[in-house]
């Protein structure tokens, strides 16, 4: 077995060589790093839109996409944070295209492998932190510490969620300026010198939300209270970079949908949503959103859990959440890797759960569509807009939830 310090130096050296190869491009950009357990991709997209509304050229690296100025392409790597050379090349190309900003989704796994090294971060932002990747990091404290490395690397602007239980951990890192965003309000004793960005008069509807910041009304077309938090993080970044509040509002208003994130793919006679939700926290928030007046009938949940031996602890937890919130539950395959799909399903399902087990994800989606009636809502979680499924032998097979829904709906209509 290779000693840990050798692995550490290997990753660190790659980061150094990558930065050197491309001329340390982050020194010629303002780089914004966004970390957290949930909401990173959405927040990155929101920040980019706000900065563009403020008149800036922007580059983006997220689990959803890559973008340099007007050129945009999907991230098909299934990596939240690209390897050192790929990331440094993106920054290099952003400089060549005269981008002012680069917004990067920063993962704990990426930090563990030193992918954030030799990037000069102007802003470090965190969305929230809940238990995730525990097998990879050993403990929740180690996972938190990895997130904290981004804040340790950035000395200029820090942005954190005041309503998150772990706010105090991030508030302890020194920075020139600290922003704290909140819906619930300031918490005496831990706020410190942070500038507060607060959402007031929040109204959550079946089509989005409204809220105001400093008396200015914001209209968000994205579903869920959690997306108000994502928006507040993005607004805090915008304000920290001199983008006025009106431009922040106008930028967010232009966002119609975030692919694979609470994305509605069928509107009538019932509704179908796809969502990435791969953690208990994100799954519960997705279910709560679906229960907040989205439909008038039953909630049908289609879910699975990732294989590869990762975070097995959360499988029964996610099953319990489906049992709690859904009227009907269909448990199916997700990304089994080298694990047995049926074994993963059995770990999700508890003895007292009334569920339908269908290993084939296509058949599971077909069954959900077959069961749905007018006014019902189907929520398909775990894949979002991913375009592949990871199976045994290190293989990836083509897969797309949205496309499958469309094909199976057409099939069922053709049978009538």
Image (tube, helix red, strand yellow):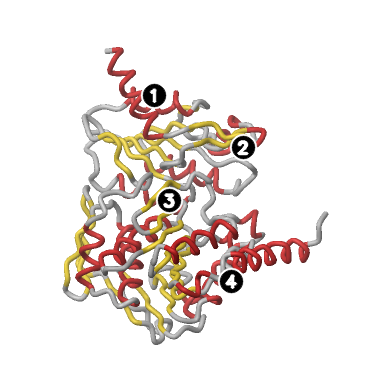
Residue at image mark 3: 65
Q: Earlier in the sequence, mark 1 or mark 4?
A: 4
- What percent of the width, then of the height, locates residue 77? 53, 46
Q: Are circles 1 and 3 on residues that touch, CB within 8 Å?
A: no
Residue at image mark 2: 337
Q: CA distance from mark 2 to mark 1?
A: 23 Å
Quarter of the image for the N terminus: give it: bottom right
Residue at image mark 4: 118
Query: Residue placed at 47% from the left, 52% from the top?
Result: 63
Mark 2 vs mark 1, foreground winner is 2
Q: Are circles 2 and 1 on residues that touch, CB within 8 Å?
A: no
Query: Residue placed at 30% from the left, 12% from the top?
Result: 415
Mark 2 vs mark 4, foreground winner is 4
Q: Given the current orientation, which residue lies at the most extreme top position? A: 415
Whether residue 109 appears in this view of the structure is: no
Q: Is residue 352 left or right of residue 384?
A: right
Mark 3 vs mark 2, foreground winner is 3
Q: Which mark is residue 113?
A: none
Local secondary structure at mark 2: loop
Residue at image mark 1: 366
- What percent of the width, then of the height, locates residue 241? 34, 76
How many residues crowd around disc 4 within 10 Å: few (fewer than 14), some, or many (20 or more)?
many
Q: Given the current orientation, which residue lies at the most extreme right position? A: 1
- What percent of the width, then of the height, locates residue 192? 41, 86
Local secondary structure at mark 3: strand
């Amino acid at each position: 077995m290779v000693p840990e310090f050798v692995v550490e130096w290997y990753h660190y050296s790659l980061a150094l060589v990558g930065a050197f190869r491309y001329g340390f491009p982050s020194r010629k950009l303002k780089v914004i790093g966004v970390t957290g357990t949930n909401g990173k991709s959405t927040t990155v997209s929101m920040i980019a839109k706000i900065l563009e509304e403020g008149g800036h050229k922007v580059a983006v690296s997220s689990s959803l996409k890559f973008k340099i100025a007007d050129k945009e392409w999907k991230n098909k790597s299934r990596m939240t944070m690209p390897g050192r050379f790929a990331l440094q090349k993106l920054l290099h190309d952003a400089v060549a295209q005269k981008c002012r900003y680069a917004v990067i989704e920063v993962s704990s796994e990426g930090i563990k492998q030193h992918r954030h090294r030799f990037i000069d971060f102007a802003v470090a932002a965190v969305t929230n932190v809940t238990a995730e990747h525990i097998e990879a990091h050993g403990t929740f404290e180690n996972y938190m510490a990895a997130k904290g490395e981004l804040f340790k690397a950035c000395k200029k602007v820090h942005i954190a969620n005041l309503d998150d239980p772990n706010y105090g951990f991030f508030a302890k890192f020194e920075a020139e300026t600290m922003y704290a965003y909140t819906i619930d309000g300031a918490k005496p004793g831990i706020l410190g010198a942070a500038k507060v960005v607060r959402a007031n008069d929040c109204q959550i509807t079946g089509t989005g939300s409204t809220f105001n910041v400093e008396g200015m009304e914001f209209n968000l077309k994205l579903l869920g209270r959690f997306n108000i938090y994502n928006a507040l993080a993005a607004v805090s970044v915008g304000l920290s970079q001199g983008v006025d509040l009106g431009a922040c509002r106008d930028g967010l208003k232009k966002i119609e949908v975030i692919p694979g994130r609470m994305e509605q793919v069928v509107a009538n006679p019932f509704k179908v949503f796809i969502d990435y939700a791969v953690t208990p926290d994100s799954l519960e928030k997705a279910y709560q959103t679906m229960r907040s007046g989205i439909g008038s009938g039953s909630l049908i949940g289609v879910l699975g859990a990732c294989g590869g031996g990762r975070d097995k602890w959360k499988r029964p937890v996610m099953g319990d959440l489906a049992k709690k919130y859904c009227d009907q539950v269909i448990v199916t395959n997700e990304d089994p890797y080298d694990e047995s799909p049926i074994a993963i399903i059995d770990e999700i399902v508890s003895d007292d759960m009334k569920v339908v087990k269908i290993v084939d994800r296509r058949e599971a989606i077909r069954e959900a569509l077959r069961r749905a009636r007018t006014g019902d809502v189907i929520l398909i979680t775990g894949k979002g807009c991913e375009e592949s499924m990871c199976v045994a032998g290190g293989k990836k097979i083509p897969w797309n939830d949205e496309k499958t829904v469309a094909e199976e709906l057409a099939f069922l209509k053709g049978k009538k």
